[in-house]
Amino acid sequence: MRQNQTLTGRERTFSADDVIATKTDLKGHITYVNRVFLNIAQLDLKRSIGPPHSIIRHPAMPRCVFKLLWDRLAGGHEVFAYVINRAMSGDHYWVFAHVTPSYGPDGAVVGYHSNRRVADKSKVTGVIEPLYAELLAVENKHTDRKQGMNAAFALLLDKLKTAGIDYDRFVFSI
């Protein structure tokens, strides 16, 4: 499914009482969505089941943050992250995401589960947007996308090391 490439600059919101919930298989293809997801992403159920979760990826979202997410999930860890997503209209919405592995009866990871809540606007504008803009600028300096992602990832890790905190402490200290 092709993503809408037009950005409107309009921000969508959802209630602080709502939770966006999705599940994916091991490859990141959507296997479950709730109504809040359908409403905010402007998708119908038929179009939302099956495609990769990146269907809602916003181009302002640094790839290195997804690298961090996938690396942590591969290590069996849950991840909390601020994410900007794109609705099908080109509108955007910020979330504070909690992504965790889903386990089958034998203890093997069978997919991933994500719950997202409304992101605190002051944290997004005060910390996350400037950080993500810096990371994205590093990514975009490279003609090779993987090299750009790895360079931005190294910058992110260096910032955490310089601050003397790990990623989890950082995300919860904002």
Image (tube, rainbow, N blue to C red):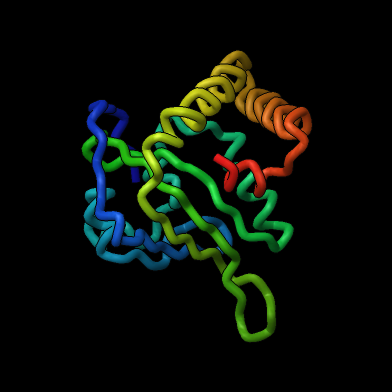
Rendered image quadrant of residue 64: top right
Kindly identify the residue that appears in the image at 25 percent across and 64 percent down. Answer: 35
Relative placement, left or right, of 122 versus 36 is: right
Where residue 72 appears, as percent x and y from the top left, is 68, 53
User: Which of the two residues, 44 or 39, is positioned nearer the viewer here?
Assistant: 39
* Between 126 and 46, the one nearer to me in the picture: 126
Left or right: where 158 falls relative to 139: right
User: Which residue occupies the extreme top position in the image?
Assistant: 141
In front of the other: 74 or 11:
11
Looking at the picture, how far across and down is residue 44, in whole percent? 22, 58
At x 61%, y 48%, the residue is 69
Q: Looking at the rendering, in which quadrant would you find the C terminus? A: top right
Vertical order, 92 against 43 (above or below) = above
Q: Is residue 78 above or below residue 96?
A: below
Q: On the rendered structure, is 144 left or right of 59?
A: right
**121 vs 35: above or below:** above
Residue 5, image quadrant: top left
Q: How many marks?
A: 0
Measuring 77% from the left and 36% from the top, which residue is drawn there?
164
In x, y percent, where is residue 116?
Answer: 41, 55
Q: Position of residue 11 (x, y in %)?
A: 26, 35
